[in-house]
Amino acid sequence: MNLKIAGLGRGIPKRSVTNDELAEFLDTSDEWIVPRTGIKSRFICTDESLTDLCETAANQALRNAGVTAGELDLIIATTIGGDYSTPSLAFVLAESIHANCPAFDINAACAGFIYALDAAAAYLETNRAKKILIVSAEKMSRHINWSDRSTCILFGDGAGAAVVTPGDSLKYCGISAENNTRVLNLPTSTGTSPFATVKAGVSYLHMDGGEVFKFAVSSVARETAKALEACGLSPDDIDFYVLHQANKRIINSIRTRMKLPEEKFPVNIDRYGNMSSASVPVLLSEMSDDGRLKRGDKLLLCAFGAGLTTATSVLIWDN
C-alpha cells in the first residue's frame, strides 16, 4: 500500500488529574481504579479548545515531516465531536494552521486513526494527494457524566497527528464493524424543536463495560490474526503491538492470549487514560520521540470503538 508516516505530533492539555483528585468528589480511590483499569491520571482540558490541541499536534507533525501547511493536499480529522457541529474539525484546523486544501472529518470512534490511514492510503494510491495530515483529537471530558464513576474515571483529552506521504511502509489495513450501537453510544439532544414528541435532555456517554471488554478482546484477537496471515507474519515477527489504550486489563488479556512478552505491548494509559481515537497516534508520537521506534521495526496497530468498529494495520517503520 502506498503510504508512509513522515512525521508525528501530539497536543496534550496542561492539566493532569490524578485518581486521588477524582476521589475528592467521587466514591472511588486510586486503589480501586488502578487494578481495574491501569489508569493513574489523565489530562483534562481547562481553557484549551479541541482546535488548540489539534494545532499543537499538527504543527509538531509538520515540523517532524519537513512539510509546511501550505504543501498539504488534504486534512483528515477523526473525532466524535469537534468544537463545532459544523464546520468540521478538519476545516477549522486548516484555517488555524493556514492550510489551503480540502478537509473533512471521520467519526469511527476510537478506531478513527486507523480508519483515516485507510482513507489516506486510497488518496495516495490513486495520486489524488501527495501530502496528507491526519489529526485524531478528542475532548472526552465534555461528553461524560462526572458523577458516574464507571465512565468518568476512564477518559482523557488529547490529540495526535501524523503526516503521511507516498511510501511502502503500510503493508496491511483492514477496517470492520459490527452493528451494535446499544453497548457504547453518545446520544444527541433534540434541541428546542416544538414538533419533537420525544424530548432528550443533556446527554452523556453510555457504556456497558462488560460487553465492550468482551468485544475488544475477541475482535482484536480476530483482526490481529487476520492481519498477520495476510502479511505472512507470525505473532513473534511484530516488534510492537500499538493497541488502543482503553483499559490495561484489555491489553493484558490480549497479550496473554497471544503468549507474547509485555515489552511488545507499549502503554501510556497510566498517564493519559482513554483518549478515544487520539490514543494510538499519541502513543506512536511518544515512541518516536523517545527512540523506541527504529527503522525497520514491524508495527501492528489495532483499535476498537463504538459502532462497534475495529481497525487494524501493519506497517514497517521507515522514519
Image (spheres, rainbow, N blue to C red):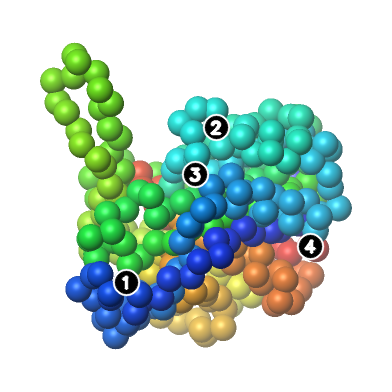
**Element under disc 4:** loop
Q: Is residue 277 visible?
A: no
Marks 2 and 3, how far apart in space? 10 Å
Residue at 35% across / 44% down in the picture?
Answer: 307
Residue 79 circle label: 3
**Element under disc 3:** loop
- Residue to which mark 1 is pinned: 22
- If you read the primary sequence from the N terminus, does the residue marked by circle 4 or circle 1 appear first? 1
Marks 1 and 2, how far apart in space? 32 Å
Foreground: 101 or 297?
Answer: 101
> Which amino acid type is shown beneath numbered disc 3?
Thr
Could you tell me if the residues under marks 2 and 3 are in contact, i.e. CB atoms within 8 Å?
Answer: no
> Disc 1 or disc 2, which is closer to the eye?
1
Question: How many neighbours does mark 3 have within 10 angstroms: few (below 14), some (14-19), or many (20 or more)?
Answer: many
Could you tell me if the residues under marks 1 and 3 are in contact, i.e. CB atoms within 8 Å?
Answer: no
Q: Residue furthest top?
A: 195
- If you read the primary sequence from the N terminus, does the residue marked by circle 2 or circle 3 appear first? 3
- Residue to which mark 4 is pinned: 318
Residue 38 appears at what percent x and percent y? 39, 78
Marks 4 and 1, how far apart in space? 41 Å
Q: Residue furthest left?
A: 197
Question: How many neighbours does mark 2 have within 10 angstroms: few (below 14), some (14-19), or many (20 or more)?
Answer: many
> Which amino acid type is shown beneath numbered disc 2?
Ser
Answer with the quarter of the image where residue 133 lies: top right
Left or right: 183 as drawn, with respect to 112: left
Residue at 63% across / 65% down in the picture?
Answer: 284
- Residue to which mark 2 is pinned: 88
Q: Is residue 75 above or below residue 149?
A: above
Residue 95 appears at what percent x and percent y? 69, 33
Marks 1 and 3, how far apart in space? 25 Å
Marks 2 and 4, how far apart in space? 31 Å
**Element under disc 1:** helix
